[in-house]
Amino acid sequence: MERKYLIAHGYFTLWVLLLSLAPLLSFWWVMPRPDHLMGEIYRFTTLGYYGLLLSVIAVLCLPLSTSRWTRPLYAILLAGWLLYLVIDVATFNLYLFHVDWVMIEMFLMDFTGLGVPVFLLVLAGLLALATCAVLCWLSAKTPSMAFAQRGKPLLLAVGLFIVLLTGNSIINIWADRYHRQEISYITPYLPLYQPITSSKHAEPLARLLPGIFPAEFGTLDREAVQEKSVIQYPLEPLQCTPPEKPASILMLVVESWQADALNPEVMPNLSRFSEQALRFDRHISGGSATVPGLFSLFFGLHASYYPAFKATPDANPSLFTETLANLGYDTRVYTNTNLERFSLRRLIFPRVPENHFSQQETDRRVVNDFLKRNTKVNRTPQFDFVFLTSSHSPYKYPRQFAYFHPLPKVKGGYALNKHSDNRVYKNDYYNSLVYVDHLLGEILQQLEQTGALENTWVVITGDHAEEFNENQAGFWGHGSNFTRWQTQTPLLVRAPGKVLPAHEPRPSTHQDIVPTLMHEVLGCTTARESYSTGENLLALPEHRNSVISSYYNHAYWVDGTILDRSTGKEYQWNDFNQRANSIDKDRLHQLRAEERRFFKSKASLRE
């Protein structure tokens, strides 16, 4: 490749970056201005993120700069980038969320249904053509421009981007660890923005530069944080009148629990318990990973809201656990997982004191602690959350619970062959569930012996499911697709005098659990639409829409059809390889409205 074309390729990318500044800086106008200098610096350094993003695209597209016939392709690609930013600015100004592939597809299918007039569509088309034409012309002319023969300015620009991104990452690592919401509130306002976090590097950073990055937690009060948040939750104050003798609530959550594993052979204790409970045969987690699963479980919201809530957790904690605290419930948490990560503890259990937060090394110790603290019926209503994780890969269990054989010679050996025989790995997984079933059996047995079960709502479910290549597409574990093998998990609900033992065939979701408990147990009469996107489990509709999330991706679930929002791919919830019929656009509009419901209006942000 000739040197001049290489340099011209870089300059052309730089021109596009400069053009990108207009839409990127317009997001600053929407967001509330930072109150501190560090916030202003952080906001400015985000430009390095986008500079390096385009630099990476430029490097990947270098082969397109070798010919005058291929250079226009690169110009069209970057024109698409500019148009995406312009469309995203308009969308964010209206709805306070960013554009994804499905929204673009919906726009192309039914732009009038989204309220877009025809003349505006024509104007946008002309703008797109003009942008492509100008960039194609600029791409062709750049190699002949005199200044485009000098490579040093390009190196300086890339160096500046690296410095800015490094500064941005350092600030965010510190802000994330020390709950500096005067920094983190900025994240939801920016498109395609995924800042770097690292808890293990934050404390050394604070020791190295204590004057700049003090090891002190943020001190913004809830009202100040709420002003900067994009979230309005709930939409109206909650009205609750609990019964004279409120029931206790016990929530037992099993890590990576596949629905098919709830059977007498693998989990005899829970199978017997299910005969006394309402068993939901088609229950779907709010996510195919732990974070979205727990978020939807405790908020009663689609997990696509999680990034916005995480940015300002002190302003928007779980309304369910807040209501429990306000009504005098004694809340205790038992787990061996680190809920400090991903702001889960601050979001879900901000008012649980340390002496009620039991974080042990093993599930055995978790259950021992629970049994020790619950030897008799408490006069105060309780909410106990027990989260067991032995069934997370690599699966853990004592040798005496190895009921299923043969076992894999190497745990996780399927990573070397995605189409390995899944039986040995599933045996390993089943053994961990045998162990979990034994531990949960101890809990249920003690509560029955003490009589606590007679006035306790028991909810048993998983955070998500676990796949063993059942789709025959090379997927193992969780977080990689939204089929039933990664999202369908058991749900059992037992409430003496309120819920009769039965099988419920209608679809249910994690989002349904909070509004059910709020209404049926806590006596909340406020319309559930003002704080949840779920239904009442005791009055489920026949047809369902839902949003399922992964680590960074989201999908729509409509009556058994999955629409992946990042790729636009449609497939059956039961089978990744089976193409689905197109989802009704009205159902998609309904889901979009649910995802917008708890975002503030632009006007309220500027007040």
Image (tube, helix red, strand yellow):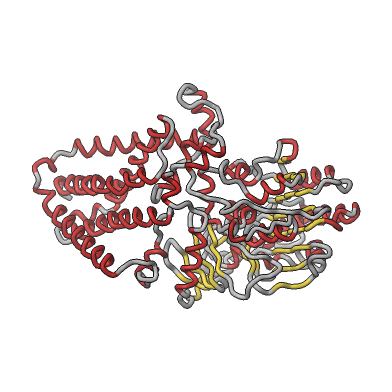
Q: Quadrant of residue 344?
A: top right
Residue 582 at x, y percent in the picture = 45, 76
In this view, the residue farthest toward the bottom is 581
- Residue name at image x 50 percent, y 67 percent: 590
Q: In the rendered view, does 83 fall on the left or right side of 308?
A: left
- Residue name at image x 13 percent, y 54 percent: 140
Seen from the viewer's position, the closer of residues 270 and 398 is: 270
Seen from the viewer's position, the closer of residues 272 and 192 is: 192
Q: In the rendered view, does 285 fall on the left or right side of 135?
A: right
Residue 579 at x, y percent in the picture = 47, 76
Total numbered badges shown on the rendered structure: 0
Q: Quadrant of the C terminus?
A: top left
Q: Is residue 126 above or below residue 161?
A: below
Q: In the rendered view, does 125 fall on the left or right side of 45?
A: left
Q: Is residue 126 above or below residue 338?
A: below
Q: Quadrant of residue 360?
A: top right
- Residue name at image x 39 percent, y 58 percent: 99
Seen from the viewer's position, the closer of residues 513 and 274 is: 513
Residue 230 appearing in the image: yes
- Residue name at image x 68 percent, y 51 percent: 389
Residue 456 at x, y percent in the picture = 81, 56
In this view, the residue farthest toward the top is 211
